[in-house]
Amino acid sequence: MHRARIVCRLTFALFAFLLCGALSAHQSSKENSAGQHPYADAPSLKICLRLSDDSPFSGLANLHVVSGQGSELPGETTDSEGEAILPNLAAGSYSVEASAPGFVSVKQTVEIKLGRGIETLFLIMRPDAFPDNSSIGLFGAANENAAFHIPPGVDAVVPKVWPGVSCDLPVVLRGVGERITQLVSNLEKFSATEHIEHYGVDKKGMLHSRETRSFEYLVLVSQNPVQGFQLDEYRNGSTDPSQFPAGIATNALPAMALIFHPLMMSEFNFSCEGLGRWAGRPAWQIRFEQRQDRQNRIRYYKIQGNYYPVALKGRAWIDAATYQMLRLETDLIRPVSQIDLTYERLSIEYGEVQFHSRALRLWLPATAELYWERHGRRYYRRHSFRNFKVFVVDTNQKFQQPKESYSFTNASDRDVPGVLIVTPISGSKFNAVSIAFIVPAGRSVFKTIGTGKDVDIPSDLVGSAKYVYKGTEGEVKVDASLAAESTLEVVSDPSP
């Protein structure tokens, strides 16, 4: 066994995070050394594709520019989304037409004159009419003592798509992957007000026993070298699952979009069902299914310290104009017999959140609905989020662990079990607290300290702590954030 003793004289840790930039790509100036645009001496035409809200159009688009003599002219894309430039044009009239799947083609004529430098033309892309897609499986209205509509499975009903429109799956996956990458780099900490409605569902399909909860919801997003991402959630400052109705916690809903992150895509098979529509927006309809030959890292159930991975299949609607995630639905590939989980249906709706203080727009979960059956019991739960806030600090600052807590970071590629024993100071009326838990591979676990928290001892009455884990020295890194002095002993036990 290896023993290490650490004397802790740590002040309160401050939450901090890194914000790498705005969600949309910033515009490159393309200026020369003299500070002028390289095409400033000759007539040029810059074409900007926009949506009705003036945001850039980033989807698949065809742009045709024809001179008055009937010649089609090539353009050059810029570093800004939805923009192209045609340099060194002769004076005259030009016809410009832009088209995109699911959008009304727009055509306009522009006059290019000598000595005018760059002429900028803005074209507004508007959604086209679309066949009704009311066949999409939605949850019914949730009212106590009312019949509950269980939506059909992902494969039971395939929503309608636009006839005759082909889908370039690699381009769509690359586009949404860039958006999710930007989201992770921009959003390393946010808070919101979360409201939960929870119902039991009886054998007749009636909702009953309504319970509600409201939380101040805090999310920390970080990356690690083993699993790629880590999501830490706090509700009213605690991670205690007993806060939830029925003592069943539904965590990591914001992480579901990571299915489409480039680091996670290889774990799923994707197919494009065509161009659909969601919330009035043309959207690429993508079906996905977890690969059986890859590690399942996206969803699991944690019961009495044990982890049970859940293999998923599902469908997502990706905005055809921006590649933002609009909606995500998941089903079980198969029941999970070890925990008697026979059914689970999850749907998440995403909405644009404008953070005015940072001129930042992010697409985050607005609502999430979950229906599941386990041990013959059925439940329905709805989450809704509002009052989003992001927190911005200098870019050289890093995350720190929550104040009044112990942190355990697993640097290995396997789950590590261990036990934390916290002893109060001599003469205290509080008893020692022993917590057995597993630190998942490549992830961190926090155990908060204080009355009603993981370690149910006031932080100023903690005398010492000892953490013993099954593994080799250095596999789990342990730290403490306490206002008062205490000791922390870490013991690694490599024996089987």
Image (cartoon, rainbow, N blue to C red):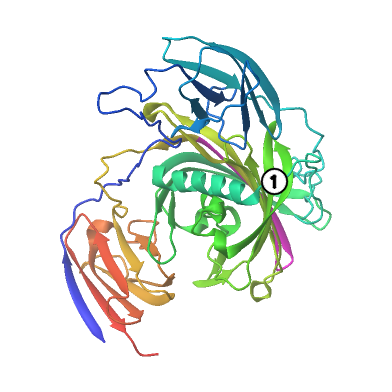
**In the rendered image, which quarter is residue 175 located in?**
top right
Q: Residue at x 32, y 75 (%)?
A: 475
Measured as percent of width and height from the top left, residue 468 is found at 32, 78
Label 1 element class: loop
Q: Residue at x 28, y 39 (%)?
A: 393
Measured as percent of width and height from the top left, residue 319 is found at 62, 38
Residue 110 visible, this angle = yes
431 or 368, which is in the foreground?
Answer: 368
Q: Relative to residue 32, is residue 108 depicted above or below?
A: above
**In the rendered image, which quarter is residue 335 located in?**
bottom right
Give the extent of the magenta segment: 371-386
Q: Residue at x 44, y 48 (%)?
A: 184
Q: Which residue is mark 1?
A: 167
Q: Is residue 466 magenta?
A: no
* Residue sitting farthest toward the front: 69
Residue 143 visible, this angle = no
Q: Main secondary structure of the magenta part?
A: strand
Image quadrant containing the N terminus: bottom left
**In the rendered image, which quarter is residue 277 located in?**
top right
